[in-house]
Amino acid sequence: MTTASVETTRTQSGAFVFTISAVSALAGLLFGYDTGVISGAILFVQEDFRLATFQEEVVVSAVLLGCLIGAAFSGRLADRFGRRSVLIQVACLFILGALGTAFATGSVWLSIGRVIVGIAIGIASYTAPLYISEISPAGIRGKLVSLNQLMITIGILVSYLADYGLAASRLAMDVRPCRDPGSDSANRPCLRAGKPALVRERAHARARQRSALENT
């Protein structure tokens, strides 16, 4: 083989390995997203499902329980079934857990779905970087393995952006007209979307106090 053909083969091989590593690192993206998104989503979950304090704690910690189970068996599963096969099954678990949480009708099913997601996270956190390190050439192994950590942080960032979007949409739905003739909401104060809930509550409290003073 000529020098040019050898260099072309190396370039193609490097691009292929990078693509496979990037796809495998998507497990890290899901790891970060599913871990961080509950911090903001729980406020809306608690309201929609009318969760008690203990139920709220169970829903939040369900992912950690699943992570514990998945991490405990991840090494044995990877050795028995192979890294790539396990990552494919983990992707199926992520899909199953996402569907379970999306269509949950109560806190029990929501917790079960999050346990499934946690199992997938626990297995992926071990298998994904292991698989990337095994397929990567020695010269770029560190760079490719770090993709998994990078995707974890990106997933956390995306989850916070999603929480921010949910909060903004909920605040927009809470906005009502300042004056509505013929209804009981005539004294309701003007509130712009984007104000925190505490500010809205204080504004409503001040409006009620002014209304009470005017009626006395």
Image (cartoon, rainbow, N blue to C red):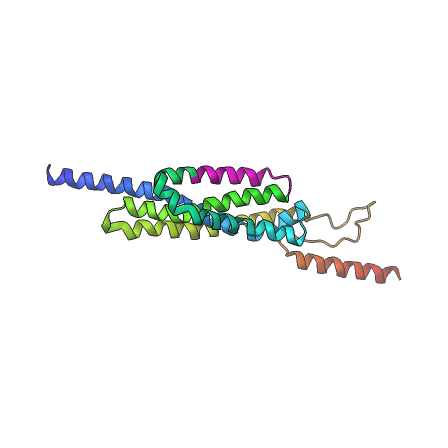
Name the image quarter holding residue 109.
Answer: top right
> On screen, 190 above or below 94?
below
Residue 118 seen in render:
yes
Side (left or right) of 46 relative to 6: right
Q: Is residue 193 visible?
A: no
Secondary structure mostly taken by the magenta-highlighted segment of the chain: helix
Would you say 193 lies left or right of 118 here? Answer: right
Residue located 48% across and 45% down the image: 119
Q: Residue at x 15, y 37 (%)?
A: 5
Front residue of this view, candidates 162 and 133: 133
Tell me residue 54's x, y (percent): 65, 53
Looking at this rendering, what residue extends furthest in the left direction?
Answer: 2
Determine whether, in the image, residue 57 is placed left or right of residue 208.
left
Residue 170 in percent (x, y) is at 63, 47
Identify the residue shown where x is 68% and y is 51%. Answer: 52
Q: Residue at x 82, y 48 (%)?
A: 184
Q: Which segment is the magenta one? A: 90-106
Quadrant, the N terminus? top left
Q: In terms of depth relative to the viewer, which is nearer, 35 or 187?
A: 35
